[in-house]
Image (cartoon, grey):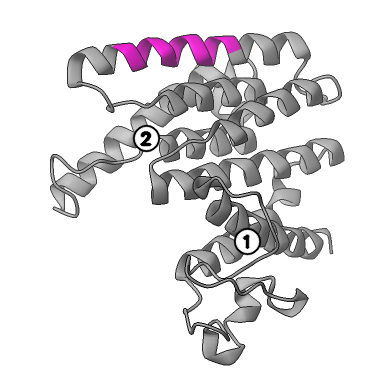
């Protein structure tokens, strides 16, 4: 039953993520779900707040401009619902379950915005870091010292990577948003998980990029957002950090 409840929560969280992913990169104040067409001002009522609901209304199109429901919106809602449904089987502590669900929603939002806009927004990472530091006072598996140290380590290490990439490959190889994302990850994960997460993010970026190049899905000069790999690594460490750490130490 708890899995069903969290699936519904994940579905709703996916709807919020979709709306924020539309509004925040445009520097718009978050509002009710609306047509993503910038030339359309239609705002959906409660029956159309979720993309999965809009898919079955008006032929899956905006009733004013005819703009179709985007597949991204459907994938985000469905994927978040499935992931949230699995959380109770992975996380046993109730408080950790709720807080990590919030963290994962934030990280999914970062992935979506970075993939679509090549941006990691301060309006997401900075408040997220502050919230993670505050929640470190109440979570059972992390304390404020570990969270603060993790945030500092994440920031400093990736700041060094940022400058090294800038000197080696030129401006834009690693963005300043990635540095702040690493800080957010450190506040969420603490030490030593942040170190493993950063290494895992770098490995994921290298392996996936190599695969895309080998299959010619991208070209050598194609820009690939890096934040998605870091955020994915953070989600993996939130869910299986202890098991991964134990495996590395054995």
Q: In this view, does 216 lie to the left or right of 97?
A: left
Queried whether the magenta region covers residue 159, the answer comes back as yes
Q: How many marks?
A: 2
Q: How far across and down, in percent of the image, does residue 227 sit?
A: 43, 35
Residue 14 numbered tag: none
Q: In the depicted view, which residue is nearer to us: 219 or 35?
A: 35
**Label 2 CA crowd tier, 10 Å (few <14, some 14–19, many 20+):** many
The dominant secondary structure in magenta is helix
Give the image location of residue 143, x and y in percent.
Answer: 78, 15
> Which mark is drawn over residue 82?
1
Q: Viewed as shown, does residue 176 lie left or right of 16?
A: left
- Residue that appears at 58% across and 91% down: 58
Q: In this rendering, is residue 160 above or below 91?
A: above
Locate the N terminus and report the quarter of the image it occupies.
bottom right
Distance from disc 2 to disc 1, alpha carbons, whole Å, reads 24 Å
In this rendering, the label closer to the viewer, 2 or 1: 2
Give the quadrant of residue 6. bottom right
Q: Name the residue under label 2.
A: 226
In the image, what residue occupies the spot 86% across and 41% down? 94
Task: Work out whether residue 47 or residue 41 is closer to the camera in this orientation and state it.
Answer: 41
- The image shows residue 67, relative to residue 161, as above or below, that is below
Q: Does residue 50 appear in the picture of this structure?
A: yes
Q: Which tag, 2 or 1, sits closer to the chain's start?
A: 1
Identify the secondary structure beneath mark 2. Answer: loop
Percent x, y of residue 140: 82, 24
Res 247 seen here: no
The magenta stretch spans which residues? 152-163
């Amino acid at each position: 039953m708890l899995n069903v409840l969290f699936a519904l929560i994940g579905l709703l969280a996916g709807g919020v993520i979709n709306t924020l992913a539309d509004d925040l990169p445009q520097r718009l104040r978050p509002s009710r779900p609306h047509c993503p067409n910038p030339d359309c001002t239609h705002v959906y009522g409660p029956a159309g707040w979720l993309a999965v609901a809009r898919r079955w209304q008006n032929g899956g199109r905006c009733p004013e401009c005819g703009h179709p429901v985007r597949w991204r919106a459907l994938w985000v809602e469905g994927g978040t619902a499935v992931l949230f449904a699995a959380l109770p089987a992975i996380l046993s502590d109730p408080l950790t379950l709720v807080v990590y669900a919030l963290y994962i929603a934030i990280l999914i939002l970062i992935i979506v915005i970075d993939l679509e806009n090549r941006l990691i927004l301060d309006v997401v990472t900075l408040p997220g870091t502050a919230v993670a530091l505050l929640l470190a006072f109440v979570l059972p598996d992390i304390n404020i010292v570990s969270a603060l140290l993790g945030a500092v380590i994440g920031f400093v290490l990736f700041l060094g990577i940022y400058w090294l990439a800038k000197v080696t490959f030129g401006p834009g190889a690693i963005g300043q948003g990635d540095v702040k994302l690493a800080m957010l990850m450190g506040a969420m994960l603490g030490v030593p998980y942040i170190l493993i997460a950063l290494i895992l993010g770098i490995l994921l970026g290298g392996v996936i990029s190599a695969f895309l190049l080998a299959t010619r899905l991208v070209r050598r000069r194609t820009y690939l957002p890096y934040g998605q790999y870091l955020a994915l690594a953070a989600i993996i460490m939130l869910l299986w950090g202890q098991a991964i750490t134990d495996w590395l130490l054995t």
